Image (cartoon, helix red, strand yellow):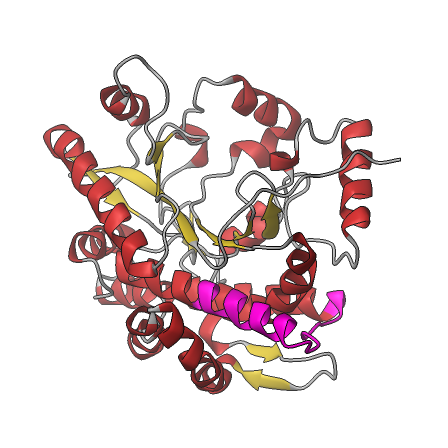
Amino acid sequence: MAAALEFGRSARSTVGIEWELALVDKDSGDLRQVAQTILDAVTPEGGGQHPHIRQELLLNTVEIVTGVCNTIAEAGKDLTLSIEQLRELTDPLRVEFMCAGTHPFARWTNQKVTDKQRYATLIDRTQWWGRQMLIYGIHVHVGIEERRKVLPIMRAMMTYFGHFQSLSASSPFWGGKDTSYASNRALMFQQLPTAGLPFQFDEWSQLEAYVDDMLKVGVIDQFDEVRWDLRPSLRYGTIETRIADGSSNITEVLALAALTQCLVEYFSTMLDEGKELPTMQSWFIQENKWRSARYGMDAILILNNAGDEALITDDLPRLLTMLEPTAERLGCLEELRHIDTIMRKGASYQRQRAVARRHGGDLGAVVDHLVREMRAGKPL
């Protein structure tokens, strides 16, 4: 019999955000391996981990995380404070923050792995693919007050997988080349063991059996090593979305977080009202993942289990209208409406390609653009 998986206690629809930031040289735009210097400087007296600034796989990356927040605006303040604190350290080093699903021209072969056993174990096992994980993302946690809701809400969230990936797509370039994908990161990350789309379980006992099997055969040592694009976070009592490419500015981060929080709350309310949540065949979801990674905001997505389709830009207004009452109740209507900003100004991959065209293919100009968006806090 599989061991029980305890799901942590969390207040309903509270939110937490994790944002991975690349450290780039102010002059060259290339990645700088200075994360340990920064982390050492922010280590609390007596040791331990800073509550909002964390280590990542590569020494060119730091991750900033919020506390448990009641509103998206509160989470935004947490992230802004962390960036301001970090800039006091990075500005004298002539280091800038940049975020996109991938760095436009940096070479994975030049990157150094953080000196930590869990990362060494990962690289030892995954080798060529693991060394290539020069990628950046955003994770959004939303609190679930009852374990019985977790799997139905996860299945319903998967019907909007393509919307999240298209809106956040920001990794068209890899190693100095245009991949012709909107999100190259999405298809790279799924090469790791246990990464990619989650299984659609109907019962909690099925999840427990899966985890028991993975532990038994040595694929994982703990549940956190299940790297699905969408997963339950047992420790926090949340659903964690890991779909989105890294965003270059806080406006887009908060827009995507608001969309996540609203959808989770919308489906949670449906369960309270005894309504059936939407689901979709796993092969349709897999196809939507590929379409949104390839075509981004030009993707024609499969909308339901009947196989109806629509261009994402035609379906997003319907989705936003559906979620407006929920956003008002949660106090995140302003942040949700910035999804319109993404549609109007283009997703990050579209803006990056436009900059590259204007500068004759110079990807250094693309890095400059991403750095400026980070400083401005909005799409430019």
On the image, the x and y values in percent for residue 238 come to 54, 50
Quadrant for residue 257, please give it: bottom left
Camera sees residue 249:
no
Residues 357 and 275: in front is 275
Horizontal side of 122 relative to 31 (left or right) equals right
User: Which span is picked out in magenta?
Assistant: 259-283
Residue 33 drawn above or below residue 372: above
On the image, the x and y values in percent for residue 57 come to 46, 30
Residue 370 drawn above or below residue 117: below
Q: Residue at x 32, y 52 (%)?
A: 75
Q: Magenta span has 328?
A: no
Quadrant for residue 346, please give it: bottom left
On the image, the x and y values in percent for residue 265 come to 51, 67
Residues 364 and 124: in front is 124
Horizontal side of 80 relative to 353 (left or right) equals left
Quadrant for residue 51, please give it: top left
* Image label count: 0
Q: Quadrant of the C terminus?
A: bottom left
Residue 76 drawn above or below residue 277: above
Q: Magenta span has 260?
A: yes
Residue 71 drawn above or below residue 190: below
Camera sees residue 156:
yes
On the image, the x and y values in percent for residue 111 come to 40, 29
Horizontal side of 373 relative to 119 (left or right) equals left
Residues 107 and 247: in front is 247
The extreme top residue here reads 46
Horizontal side of 94 relative to 42 (left or right) equals left
